[in-house]
Every structure is written in structure tokens, then in C-alpha cells.
Image (spheres, grey):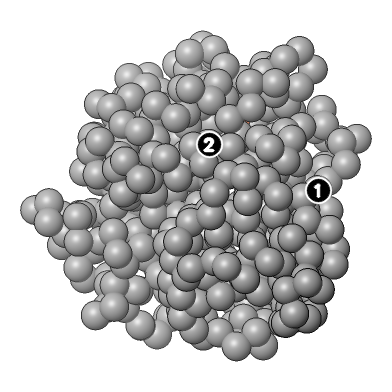
Amino acid sequence: MTPTALKSTAPEHRSSCAVELADLQPGSPISRDLALHLIRCDDDDLPALLAAARAAKENFKPGVITYSRKVFLPLTNLCRDYCGYCTFRRDPQEAAAHTMTPEEVLTVARAGEKLGCTEALFSLGDKPEMLFPEMRGTLRQLGYKSTLHYLEAMCELVLRETSLLPHPNPGLLSAEWIARLAVVSPSMGLMLETTSHALLAPGAAHDNASDKVPAKRLRTIEDAGKQQVPFTTGLLIGIGETLEDRVDTLLAIRDLHDRYGHIQEVIVQNFRAKPTIPMAQVPEPSRGEMLRAVAVARLLLPNVNIQAPPNLNAPYYEELLDAGINDWGGISPLTPDYINPEKPWPHLEQLRLRTESRGFQLRQRLPVYPEFSPVVISRPGVLSEKLQAARDDEGLARRKRAA
Ligand code: SF4
């Protein structure tokens, strides 16, 4: 779906959406009312919405789309929560339950380094030792008090032994743990997912997931802001929330960013149904819904990096460029997407060709975005040195030939 110009230049022939879009000032965020209007726009108005979103993206970061070349390190797939859409988590007795050893972590990180990766994405379940004695035993054997102590040590190991920069995604964090992890990782992440409390109700997506209470997640994101930690967050669409919830989730992120200026990236992720999950029968959001959510995210947050995962939107993922994203997120040439293993990442050459087909240059970034790296570099230590070695003059990944 290619964005087109407004159908008519005569105001009397334009829909109310088109008239409001025509009045937008580049770089100025739209209001809640307009966002609610636009996220419900009909198909006739969609091209104008996409054109406005793409123009906002070009005002923010012209001509370039970024991605992060990464290895995916599923440090443990045990988790104390049971989200209705999750295929990643396991209970200890399940055959595929696994906690990576330090040797496994280093082997994957070194293999990724040889392939030109610059990010070590640590994704893991939320505090599994609180629920499972088996995890407490595993941690004891490894020599750590908690999953977060182990994560901290593995980030430090990767930072010390390789050129990769860790980006941990471990679930809820206290202010103290944000400070500790910020010593060994330039950025970190927690998906807000939604601000809807309705999803905590019996039978809903977060019915059995105490870590998904919106206020707790907002507090972690706020604590990161108070410490000026570059932070990735986002929303998950299609898990039972309303269109209004999507707008309000974006507004909650915007509010935190307005106060602390630390939101380096907002991910707009679409729910995908899988046969093994409790939500297997829930319909997936349509392509039109996804494009509207991305475009509204861009217009609400015109000066924030907006990302959508290409593998969850294949085969039409380049349409996301029309809706105003400026980043494809983490793409691995080595490891699968353990969260969505049935949806492989596109080959990097394919990604480049399809990005260029929409008129953009594809550039490799680091886990921390260029505009956020100065705050990390200003803190003396190994992390600062490693980041300076990894970045080029523009703050993107220094170009080097993959071995
Ligand atoms: S989505 Fe995250 S918190 Fe929820 S069950 Fe899966 S791993 Fe746990």
C-alpha cells in the first residue's frame, strides 16, 4: 500500500481526517482526540494517514532506516508469569526448559561477533526463582543469588570478552537493579504492552501474569527515566485491548518521555496466534490495524524512534515503512527469534533491498541509539570505552567486514 497524495486539494472534498492531517505541523505531536479519530479512520483515509506519518518520519530522521544486528540470548525460558500469548516460557519439567550456561552465552556471543553483530539481546522470563525451586537450584549451582544477579554477570562477561554491547530485557526491575544493569549495558528494555487493566481479568491475556500490572511496568520505565537510562518499550496490539487502549498506552509512554527524555525506541508489535498458546483462537490484528497503530504512534511521538518487527509482518513488511517506522529492530544472522520461532527474521540482504525499494538507506545501529549514546559515554568505565569503540562518527555501528 503506497501512500498517496490527498485525493483532492479542495477542502470541501476532503474527509475530516484529511483536513486535520493537512493542518499538522512537522515535529508537533498530535492530540489524544485526533489520535483516537485517526486510529479509527476508514480505508479511504488510510493513504492520507500513512502519508502524514511518513512525512513525520522524514522530518525526524530523513532517508535512513536502521536495524540492530544482534544475537538473541534466551538466558532462561523459565518464567513466573503465564501470559496468554506466550510461546517462549516453560515450566521446569518441560523438555525444552533451559537456562544457558556461561559457556553457552559466550559461544553464541563470539559466533555473533564473527558475523558482525553488535548487540547481545538478553531476553528471559521474569524472576522464575520466585516460583520454581528448580530455578533456585540452578542458580545455586551457577553461584548466583537470583536471575538478575546471573544476568548482570553474563552482561559483564559479554562486555568484557567480546565487542558486543548487552541489551537486557528481563521484566520488571527495581531502581537498584536498573542502576546495576546500567553499568554493564548501554540500554535496556521492558515492553509496557498495554495500560489496560481489563487484560488482568479472569480469562484475559494477563489473567495469570502479575508482572503485567500496568502500574508496575510504568514504574520500572519511570525509574529508568530518573536515572537517564536509554530505554526501549512499546505496545502489543491485538491481545484484547481496545483502540482507545492503544492510544492511551502510547500516551503513557509519551508522558514518561516528556518528563525524562529517555525513551529511545517504541516498538509496535502485533499479536500472532500460535497453536500452542491459550489465545490460539484469538484473531490476529489485521494489516490495516497494524498500519494505523504504527502511523498513530509516529504522529503521537514524532521525534521518537518507532520500530516494528519485520518477521511478524512478513511478507508485506515494507508497508511498515509507509506507516512511519524508522527502525526494524534487532535482526540476527545467527540465532532464531526465540519469542516467535516460527517467524524467521528476513535475510539481511532482503531487508536491505526491500528498504531501498521504498527509497531509504539501511544502516546498522547499536543497541543504544545515536542520540542517547552521549549519556552512556559520559559515565567512565568499560562500557563507555566499548561503546566508543563500537560507534562511528554518526553514533551508528562502525562499519567492519564480517568474518
Ligand atoms: S511474555 Fe514474558 S512475562 Fe509473559 S509469560 Fe512470556 S516470558 Fe513470561
Instruction: Judge by depth and name the residue closer to the eye, 270 or 54.
Output: 54
Instruction: Judge by depth and name the residue closer to the eye, 401 or 291.
Output: 291
* 111 sits left or right of 272 in the view: left
Farthest residue toward the right?
281
Q: Residue at x 63, y 51 (%)?
A: 34
**Residue 349 x, y percent position in the rendering:** 62, 82
Amino acid under disc 1:
Pro
Amino acid under disc 2:
Leu
How far apart in space, not on screen, are marks 1 and 2 (Cα)?
18 Å
Is 172 rendered above or below residue 340? above
Query: Which residue, given by chain and number where applicable, does mark 2 sit on?
Result: 192
**Residue 134 x, y percent position in the rendering:** 53, 16
Q: Residue at x 56, y 75 (%)?
A: 55
Q: Is residue 12 visible?
A: yes
Q: Quadrant of the C terminus?
A: bottom left
> Which class describes the residues within 10 Å of circle 1: few (<14), some (14-19), or many (20+)?
some
**Residue 399 x, y percent position in the rendering:** 35, 82
Farthest residue toward the left?
380
Farthest residue toward the front?
12
> Which class describes the residues within 10 Å of circle 2: few (<14), some (14-19), or many (20+)?
many
Label 2 near ligand 1 (CB < 8 Å): no
Query: Which residue, given by chain and number where applicable, does mark 1 sit on?
Result: 285
- Circle 2 — which element? loop
- Circle 1 — which element? loop
Q: Is residue 336 visible?
A: no
Q: Residue at x 25, y 61 (%)?
A: 373
Is 227 rendered above or below residue 140? below
- Count of numbered labels shown in the rendering: 2
Contact between marks 1 and 2 (CB within 8 A): the answer is no
Instruction: Judge by depth and name the residue closer to the eye, 157 or 207.
Output: 207
Is 206 rendered above or below residue 253? above
